[in-house]
Amino acid sequence: MDFDATQVALWRERTPTSKELWERTKELIPTGHGGGMGYFVPHPIVVDHAKGSKLWDVDGNEYVDLRIGDWVLIHGHCDERIAAAIDAQLERSVQIGAPEWDAAYRLAELLGERTPSIDKVRFFASGTDANLSAIRLARVHTGRTKVAKAAGAYHGTADVLVVGTSTLRDPADQVPIGVPAHAADEVVEIPFNDPDGAAAILEREGADLAAVLIEPVLTTAGMIPATSEFLQRLREVTERLGIVLVFDEVVTYPAAFGGGQAHYDMTPDLTTLAKVIGGGIPCSAVGGRREIMDLLEPDAHGGEAPLSIMSTFGGNQIAMAAGAECLRLLTPAAHERMARLGDRARDGINALGARYGIPLQATGLGHLIGLHWTDVPVVDLPSRMTGDREKVANLILALDNLGYYQTFTGVFFLSTVIDEAEVDGFLAALEQALHRLGYVDGGDAGTPDQAPIEVGGK
Ligand SMILES: Cc1ncc(COP(=O)(O)O)c(C=O)c1O
């Protein structure tokens, strides 16, 4: 991928201390990031501190954070109300090898109240744990082994979750290095947003399929919302064939009150959750139908549960307390506000495309925003891959240089602490980035001869 030399030079000029400290960290930690998350070319910023919607790098540059802690911090950085909940819990307990009262109960109750498909819930530490546990529950429930998932979807780092077509690798590379080839035998790939195509595959493979694992919005692959028709067909076919329908709402849960499933009015059998539900502390969950969740409950089976899945940190009280406070603050009004701002951002991106006659388009739902450079409507992985990802990556580099931080692939996240002015500032910066990279004519945005871009509000 070629990066614009001027933007790269500007980046280097703005962030010399980041480079120095990143190189020092890399001596101890591969990639320099504790979790190995993707970073920028030519080097990432190293962050000194963060608060609310902003973060500051070690060179003193300020950014509006549209990456929100790798999609976790729905109330922004260092929220004082969540910090107070953590402080209060620290006085009581952190990690107990017994049932405790009442941090886990409060989080479980909140999840069940706002997401009716969740009768019961179990806690884990990561999204990967949650998806593996949902698959195991589905296997025991059905007596089958295979899992169907959508082309391009990311569901975590485990073998069975990483085989298949990924936006993160060459599409021909179906089994990543380090994964045994037989992991692919357990996976069936279905096309996203293609109800007939997906149904035909599920019918063919149904006798071996334990679960369909699906995100209501394909997130890592570009913030591509499912159509209702697609999800309804998956529900109809899985019900008929006795396959467990699992919604991976690790990322989409804050897209609407009660999750993406509430937006689509869908009832999956199981839901997997992580990221926001711990309020910034590692936490994940599997929740769903009583009958399936009770495979973990000895008392539902004469004293011996058919399945035991353990997680040392599942139910850690700091995560439970922070998560419960995070959800309490995530009111219907907070969701509506984020969705309004999400529409404002998406409308603004599309308006820029129309105004300059360029194939810039936005996708997404609620606070989730995808940016694409293609005139093909982006509805699935193949249409997403028609886009010019080099242009998107350069736009992101230029946006970073203008103080808007986000992931490299063109996916952006709003939070409850982002305001209208920051969304409009982002759109103005995007327009400026288009000019600076020479992707549109007419001088730099913001000059007096440049009419302000119209941003839609709903
Ligand atoms: C949709 C989805 N599911 C699962 C995961 C895995 O979560 P974790 O990194 O906590 O294992 C991710 C991670 O980004 C994700 O995006």
Image (cartoon, rainbow, N blue to C red):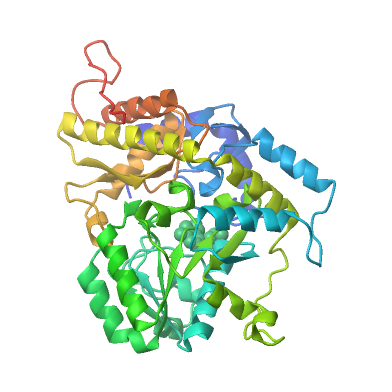
Question: Residue 245: image x %, image y %?
Answer: 41, 72
- 272 lies above or below 45: below
Res. 6 visible in picture: yes
Residue furthest out toward the right:
91
- 440 lies above or below 275: above
Which of the 4 image quarters holds residue 49? top right
- 251 lies above or below 56: below
Question: Residue 437: image x %, image y %?
Answer: 28, 32
Residue at image point 62% right, 47% down: 279
Residue furthest out toward the top:
448
Residue at image point 19% right, 21% down: 442
Residue at image point 63% right, 41% down: 21
Q: Nearer the viewer, residue 294 or 157?
A: 294
Which of the 4 image quarters holds residue 17? top right
Say left or right for 280 vs 312. left
Say left or right for 390 vs 39. left
Question: Residue 91: image x %, image y %?
Answer: 85, 46
Position of the C terminus, as image quadrant, is top left
Residue at image point 68% right, 74% down: 310
